[in-house]
Image (cartoon, grey):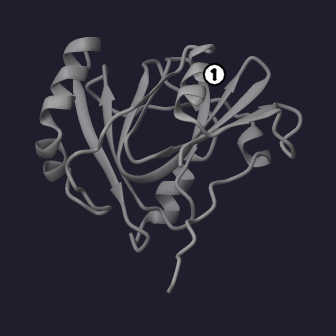
Amino acid sequence: MSRLRIFDESRPQSPLAEHLEHASIAHELGKVGVRFEQWEASQPIAPGASQDEVITAYRSDIDRLMAEKGYQAVDVISLAPDHPDRAVLRQKFLSEHTHSEDEVRFFVAGSGQFTLHINAKVYDILCEQGDLIGVPDGTRHWFDMSETPSFVAIRLFTNKEGWVANFTGDDIAQRFPRMQPRQTVTG
């Protein structure tokens, strides 16, 4: 289930608000210029799927987004819990950074946690399968995939070089809750 928690930037222990309904999440994020939509992830794609498999399965959705906003590049990040570089990849995204373009992600499978730092507030968004998030350029943020990542996300870029981060040097990301690994239910 998708979730939005809103914190005061100086109080990471207790959220000011929590939203669990998609419409409420989209409304709150829309107030700060963040796009949040729920799409039906109609093609079954498992974490660890190849980039070509994912792009082929979602070509019509990708083409529509590229035409809508002028995106020039697309790639896929696909990680399973046993990925040998999971710790290094997780660390790459955990520090607060910005981009000179919108950061658009569509979660084809699994989940990830985007945390945005906007106007003295921190917006912690758990994105699940079917969620599309569009973080405006210049927005301070970080991303967590947990210690046991399990997700496939399509990434769209206006910059043909793809993901380029400008790190802020602020340690705020270290003070806020990390994404917790999914609990496995056994029968």
Labels in figure, total = 1
Q: Quadrant of residue 102?
A: top left
Image x and y of residue 184, in percent: 53, 76
Residue in view at x 22 percent, y 55 percent: 44
Q: Residue farthest to the bottom?
A: 187
User: Residue 26, relative to residue 144: is it above or below?
Assistant: above
Query: What residue is at 71 percent from the left and 42 percent from the top?
Result: 173
Q: Position of residue 160 (x, y in %)?
A: 25, 25
Residue drawn at the location 56% of the way across and 54% of the way down? 91
Which is nearer the eye, 106 or 102?
106
Q: Residues within 10 Å of mark 1 (few under 14, many from 20)?
A: some
Left-right relation of 137 to 76: right
| Residue under numbered circle 1 | 28
146 vs 163: above or below: below
Give the secondary structure at mark 1: helix
Instruction: Out of 128 and 13, give the one closest to the viewer.
Output: 128
Where does the image place residue 22, in percent across and percent down from the top left? 53, 33
**Rendered location of residue 103, percent (x, y):** 43, 27
Identify which residue, 12 or 171, lies in the foreground: 12
Answer with the quarter of the image where residue 6 lies: top right
Depicted 11 relative to depicted 121: above or below: below
Under mark 1, the amino acid is Glu
